[in-house]
């Protein structure tokens, strides 16, 4: 299989990790900028993930209405039996 051949070749992954180490440099300012970009990118990816998760739940609710109704009834029962 082609996947197994590409997995066995580690020369590409080694060169990538070597490149990352040399790109950082010794200047702390560049590290801070890189970490800010990384944090912003992480937040962007997280927001995208949460949007997709919400969309998937809404799709599941539309496709399986009986499941939604059962969950709603269970939740109502829990709320009725909950003591303040």
Image (spheres, grey):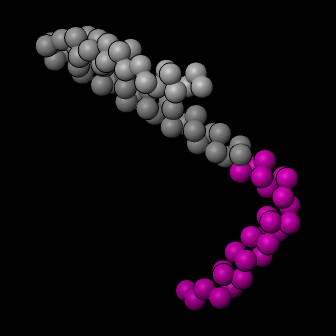
Query: In terms of image quadrants, where is residue 69?
Result: bottom right
- Is residue 12 inside the magenta stretch? no
Which residue shows up at 43% across the image and 24% down it? 8
**Is residue 13 shown to the viewer in this render?**
no
Can you give x and y, in whole percent of width and height, for residue 13 in the image?
37, 19
Main secondary structure found in the magenta portion: helix
Q: Quadrant of residue 1?
A: top right
Query: Going by the image, does 36 lie left or right of 6?
Result: left
Q: Which residues are magenta?
A: 57-84
Question: Foreground: 8 or 22?
Answer: 8
Queried whether the magenta region covers residue 69, the answer comes back as yes
Q: Quadrant of residue 22?
A: top left
The percent position of residue 55, horizontal first and vertical second, equals: 71, 43
Residue 64 visible: yes
The residue under the point 80% across, 66% down is 67
Q: Residue pushed farthest left? A: 26
Compared with residue 35, is residue 57 higher up or lower down, i.e. above or below?
below
Identify the residue shown where x is 64% and y is 45%: 53
Q: Residue at x 46, y 25 (%)?
A: 7
| Percent position of residue 84, x then y | 55, 86
The image shows residue 37 at horizontal and vertical percentages of 37, 22
């Amino acid at each position: 299989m082609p996947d197994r051949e590409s997995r066995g070749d580690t020369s590409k992954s080694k060169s990538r990790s070597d490149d990352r180490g040399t790109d950082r440099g010794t200047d702390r300012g560049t590290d801070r900028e890189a970490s800010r970009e990384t944090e912003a990118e992480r937040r962007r990816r997280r927001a995208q993930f949460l949007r997709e998760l919400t969309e998937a739940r809404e799709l599941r609710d539309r496709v399986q209405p009986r499941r939604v109704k059962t969950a709603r009834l269970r939740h109502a029962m829990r709320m009725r039996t909950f003591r303040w």
